[in-house]
Structures are given as C-alpha cells and as structure tokens.
Image (spheres, grey):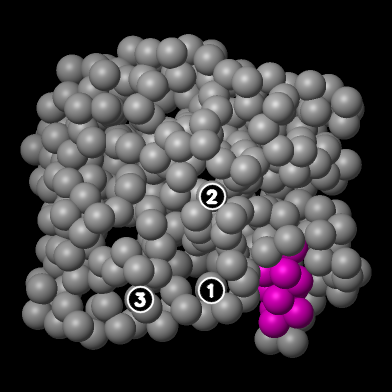
Amino acid sequence: MTKRERVERAMAGQETDRVPLYDILLCDKAIEHFSGEKLPPLVNNPETRATVDRMTGKAIERMLDATRHSTFGPLEDREFTDADGFVLRESAFAKTCWIERRPFDDVPAAAEWLKKWTARQAEAAKRVVANPRECRERHERWFRDVQARIGDTVHLYTQLGVGLDDIRHRLGFDLFAYLDAEQPGLISEALEACTRHHVALTHAIANVALSPAVLTYGDIAGKERLLHSPAWLRREFFPRLKRLNDAWHEHGFKCLFHSDGYLMEVMDDLVAAGIDGLNPIETVAGMSLRECRQRYPKLFLAGGIDMSQLLSNGTPDQVREVCRQAVRDAYPAFLMGSTTEADNSCRAENLIAMHEVAMEGVL
C-alpha cells in the first residue's frame, strides 16, 4: 500500500495495512535519527539552509505518511521588523516566530492598520481572479519542489483560513476584543475580505491529482473552553469556514480542520461547516479520541498523541501504551501524530516509539 493509498483510505474510514503517521517534524534529534545524518552547525546562509531542509525532507520521507510542513525552520535567533512595522523574533530552538512589539497600542491605530490589511486582501483577491493560471502554475511549482524533497510522503496541498488567526495575532487579544466591541464591522469586513481572497485562490490553484487534502484552520479554543462565544463564532466564523470548505470540496479535496483546544461545545457546528477531519485532538485541553470517534464516526481524526507532556516528558513505554490505545479508540479513520507538532520540546526517543507503534500494523 502506498502512502497516498494509506492516507486516502484512512480519510475515508477504510481499513489500512497500518495506521498512517501525520505530523510536523521539527525535532532536531529526530531529524538526525530518521535522516541518518548529523545536522551541521546552524549558520544563516544558503548552504546550511539547503542542507538542513534536505535532511528534514529525508527524515519526513522515512518517518511520516503525511505532513503539512517540510522545512527545518529558523537557523538563528534574530529580531527583525516587517513591512508593517511589527517587530518579530525568531527562535531556532522553538522553530517559531512571535511578535515582540506592534506598531500601534490603541484601538484607533489598530483600526487603521486593520483597514489597510483588509484592503490588501481585497486587492489580492482581484489579482487571483485576474490571473488564475499564473497563481496555479506558481503554486504547482512550489508544491512539486516540496514533494521532491519529501519523496512519497503526502503533503497537504495548502493551508488556508478565513483570517481570524492572522487578525487576532496581529492585533493581540486585547485590541481584538476592544475593536470588536467598539467597531465590530471592521473585524467582520476583514474576515470577509480574507475569505473571498482564499475562496478565489482555492478555485485558482486546486489540483487534487497532486494531493488529496488541504488544511483549513482557525484556532478557536483553549484549554477546556472556547476563545470566542458560540454566538460570535456562528455569526462570524463558521459560515465563512463553510464557504472555504465548500470551495475545496468542489474540486474533490478533503478538508482537515485544525484548531487547538477544547472544541466539543461547537463540534456540531464544525461538522455542519463541512470539515472532513479534525486536528490535533488536544488531549490536555480536554479532547478525547474515543469521544470524537463515538460522536462523529464519519470524521477522520489526525493527531491525538500529547506533545506538551507525554512526548516531552514521558518514557518510550508510556508513549507506546498511549499510541496503542489511540489506535484502538480511533481506527480506522485515524492518522496518528502529535497534538500539533513534533518540535524540540519532544524527546526523540518518544517520537521513535510513536513511529514504532505505527509500524506494528493494526492490532
């Protein structure tokens, strides 16, 4: 069974020869283990970048059946300012980037920035509609480069949301909440502009021959509770998510929805919005593979193996036990993996143990 066959059968809830692994591989020691090579000293130059990305791709090919990220991440700790004036910091160890300072600190200035962001989304949508072939060819070139690096591992075709994460991250929770209370139309207009852009992009670039699935996303929950009220999500988020999912479905794609946190309060809304799969099933936030499988038997589930405590602090035997139970709870519509990403907080020996359980076949 090829990796794509295995992944497609799992997404369809059909039996497979073994449980496929889906993850984002960012753990340096695991990259070394699965690539069979030693990482070079991390220096931010083209030669080092080419080497670590090649090694990451090689490790992904040997470890995973599916992924949505194929590069190594930042090569150095650095602070820089983007075109909008946001001061950002990258971390080579954490493999991420965050905002240190914003170019605004009050609601009026935040509103002006958001108006400009919304206008850029509208202009981007116009460019896509005017030149769909150019967009598709550019995306397919990028995708084929990615696929060449990771071999036969399935890479999700792209990842698109309706703008909630970007807007909220850029504004920060406080200014987002104040702006939504004082000028709610601005948030709604921004979400609408982004949704129109991404629906247009979907129709321009879709090619299911290259990959069977996409990631649609929006982090709407935290530990044991939602980040926004159900009423707000039903007004502003779920209808737009449905439009995005519907657009991908028109082209034959499965939509794997990603949100951290405890989602059970709005799972019916997510299903009605057209999600085909759910990731990452964050167990420490209160999510349960068994409950999701029992309540939503048609959804495929991706993730479920806690990375915040189990993969970072547990033992390989503990990981094996949890992974085997996860297979019993969620198979066959199950792609096993960490609860978001296998980063440097995870012990390589625990990631190896998870891989070993996947290779055991279905018990």
| Residue 284 position in % (x across, y down) | 61, 19
- Badge 3 amino acid: His
SS class, disc 1? helix
- Badge 1 amino acid: Val
241 left or right, relative to 314: left
Bounds of the magenta segment: 49-59
Q: Residue at x 32, y 64 (%)?
A: 208
107 left or right, relative to 294: left
| Residue 98 position in % (x across, y down) | 55, 50
Residue at which label 2 appears = 6
Residue at which label 1 appears = 146
Rendered view: 268 above or below 102: above
- The stretch drawn in magenta includes residue 54: yes
The nearer-to-camera label among 2 and 1 is 2
Task: Give me the disc on residue 139.
Answer: 3
- The stretch drawn in magenta includes residue 162: no
In primary-sequence order, the first of circles 2 and 1 is 2
Quadrant hosting residue 264: top left
Can residue 334 be seen by looking at this rendering? Answer: yes
